[in-house]
Image: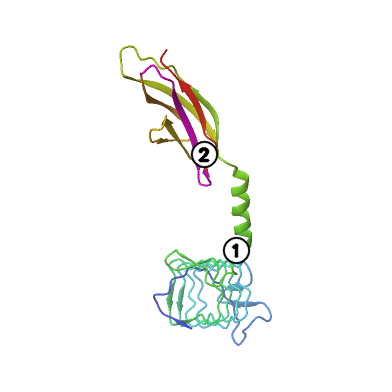
Amino acid sequence: MRVGVGWVLVAAVSSVLVAGCGGSGSSQTVNGCHIEAGTSCSGANLSGADLSGADLSRADLTGANLDGTNLSDADLSEANLSNAHMQATNLSGADLTSANLTGATISDTDLEGATLCGTTRTDGTTDDSDCPASTETTDTETTESTTTEAGAAEVTSFDVGDLKCGAATTAPVAVTWTTTNATAVEIAVDAFSPKGFGPSGTTNVVVPCDDASHTITITPQSDAGAGAAESQDVSPS
């Protein structure tokens, strides 16, 4: 796979080679940069070096020149390659897990078989294209367990004030409530259509003043459905 300038990744890479040496054999040094895990070679010139199979995990290669560098099968996991120059760089088979390629200049780069998981692209976004598949079964079981433990919605307190009519034909009655596991409640007076309210609160409902008893009913609601309703009767005092 050849990647043009538009491919975005962020990483830091450090490579070291003695003239005529290459690969992952003995310890290498390229232009003063020691090729090893965790090396710090910010701005190093590693262009054209043969660093195939090198262990550059956690290396700081910020702004390094990697033009034409052979990094095939190299371990660049968690390496910082931000703002690095990578023109015609060979990254085939390289491990770029959690590498940072933010702001890197990438052109005509070979990424065939490279591992991209948690890799920061040049534009700061994340590439997880080669991450192992997540365990869907575990996620599903966790969700089902949470839903079961939540339990049914229920009213934990329900207080209804006095109906004081005087000469009026209707009068307000204060209703106060709290619930458990509910997302909302519906409150109705007699057979009138219920109105929706929050899972806890206080409101006034309008009750007829006709010397008859009237029923105020509260029903808790949740994603699982309606819970058990509770009712109280009121009559003019």
Task: First in sequence, mark 2 or 1: give its number.
Answer: 1
* Label 2, residues with CA under 10 Å away: few <14, some 14-19, many ≥20: many
Tell me where residue 186 appears, x and y as whole percent. Answer: 44, 36
Q: Is residue 162 depicted above or below 144 in this figure?
A: above
Q: Which residue is mark 1?
A: 136
Residue 188 is marked as none
Q: Is residue 94 depicted above or below 237 in this figure?
A: below
Q: Residue furthest right?
A: 26
2 vs 1, front mark:
2
Q: Which residues are magenta?
A: 210-225
Q: Quadrant of the C terminus?
A: top left
The structure residue drawn at horizontal position 62% and vertical position 77%, both measured from the top left corner, is 54
- Prevailing secondary structure of the magenta residues: strand
Residue 182 is marked as 2
The structure residue drawn at horizontal position 59% and vertical position 74%, both measured from the top left corner, is 95
Q: Residue furthest left?
A: 168
